[in-house]
Image (cartoon, coloured by chain):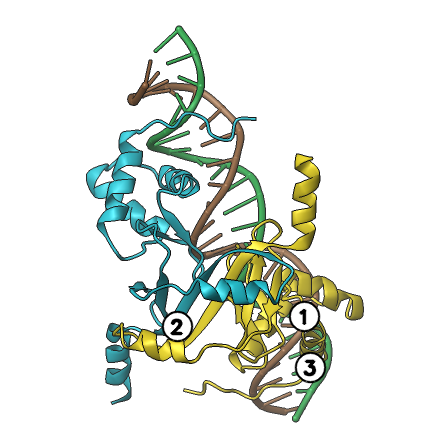
Chain colours: A cyan, B yellow, C green, D brown
Amino acid sequence: MDTNPKIRMTKQRQVILEELCKVTSHPTADEMYQMIRKRLPKVSLGTVYRNLEILSELGMVLKLDVGGTQKRFDGNVENHYHVRCTECGRVGDLHMPTDKEIEQKAQALTDFQIKRHSVEFIGVCPECREAGNRRVS
Amino acid sequence: MDTNPKIRMTKQRQVILEELCKVTSHPTADEMYQMIRKRLPKVSLGTVYRNLEILSELGMVLKLDVGGTQKRFDGNVENHYHVRCTECGRVGDLHMPTDKEIEQKAQALTDFQIKRHSVEFIGVCPECREAGNRRVS
DNA sequence: TTTGGTGCAAAGGCTTTGCAGAAAG
DNA sequence: CTTTCTGCAAAGCCTTTGCACCAAA
């Protein structure tokens, strides 16, 4: 059983990784596809999915399980917290120190073996707030 | 624009609410469907989805956006933290005080208007740990 | 040359939805 | 009676996958 076969750095894979690291917007697979297509017009959506999956297994990118129907991806592998807009689904970073201590507190309260934790703040982004204000005024 | 039309308490809706409040297992829609079918054999999966959606909009149940492909539902409406097993997807409650203060800290760091936050611990449940041990021994 | 990767399109899994008949109020 | 709800089945959305050809090493 070889769980780590040889990985080839194809043009597609490289561009996907580059573009994802370039932005801080936590794009969905489809948003990535649109970005990649500008540099590689013939790339397929399947390839984007496959590579995002592989890169996240390799720990080179993060697959985010934030709310909403689509998964999102993050080129910043360091553990950090996120904010999600309930209106448009956009996800932003929150640059605050992550609380490792909370994992120990949690571990004392459960028989699950805790590996990590994630925090998601839920709110409304400035753009959607603006749009909402316009609607009610 | 009537966002709150009259809600009728149908047998199906009532049973769905009752069964969800009865368990602490955070079932998926399909798991709910299996549970409900024992009491209402002719219920449809669509009805289960529709009612879970409606009940969560009314704030009578919680729709959980925890990791994994399927949404999960929770009869306990009070804000609390969860643990999810990376192996089987099972979700448990974590009975620890939720940290309201963290929302203020976060608010100071973002232009999103923060409404609430959720914390998910990720780990391995006792059963899956057990299964894993067996496999490697 | 030898694998692993790609593009394409079809299939899959979960959820939503249109519709005609059923039932709550 | 009126309006909402249900069961059924079809459709929808996102993601995964099989396959023949392509390309990295």
Measuring from the top left, give residue B67's x and y in whole percent. Answer: 50, 58
Q: From the viewer's perspective, tell me whether residue A119 is left or right of residue A8.
A: right
Q: Chain of mark 2?
A: A
Q: Quadrant of the N terminus of chain B?
A: bottom left
Residue type (three-letter) at the residue carrying disc 1: Thr
Q: From the viewer's perspective, tell me whether residue A73 is left or right of residue B46.
A: left
Are there few (<14), some (14-19), or many (20+) residues within 10 Å of tag 1? some
What residue sits right under mark 1 in the picture?
B24
Labels 2 and 3 share a subunit: no
B27 or A132, which is in the foreground? B27
Q: Of helix, strand and loop, which one carries label 2? A: strand
What residue sits right under mark 2 in the picture?
A122
Residue type (three-letter) at the residue carrying disc 3: Thr
B49 or B120, which is in the foreground? B120
What residue sits right under mark 3 in the picture?
B10
Cα–Cα span, label 2 and label 3: 32 Å
B132 or B58, which is in the foreground? B132
B9 or B72, which is in the foreground? B72
Measuring from the top left, give residue A28's x and y in whole percent. Answer: 35, 53
Q: Residue at x 45, y 59 (%)?
A: A69
Q: Are marks 1 and 3 in contact (CB under 8 Å)?
A: no
Q: Residue at x 30, y 29 (%)?
A: A10
Which picture quadrant has residue A84? bottom left
Cα–Cα span, label 1 and label 3: 23 Å
Q: How many numbered marks have been drawn onto this rendered protein structure?
A: 3
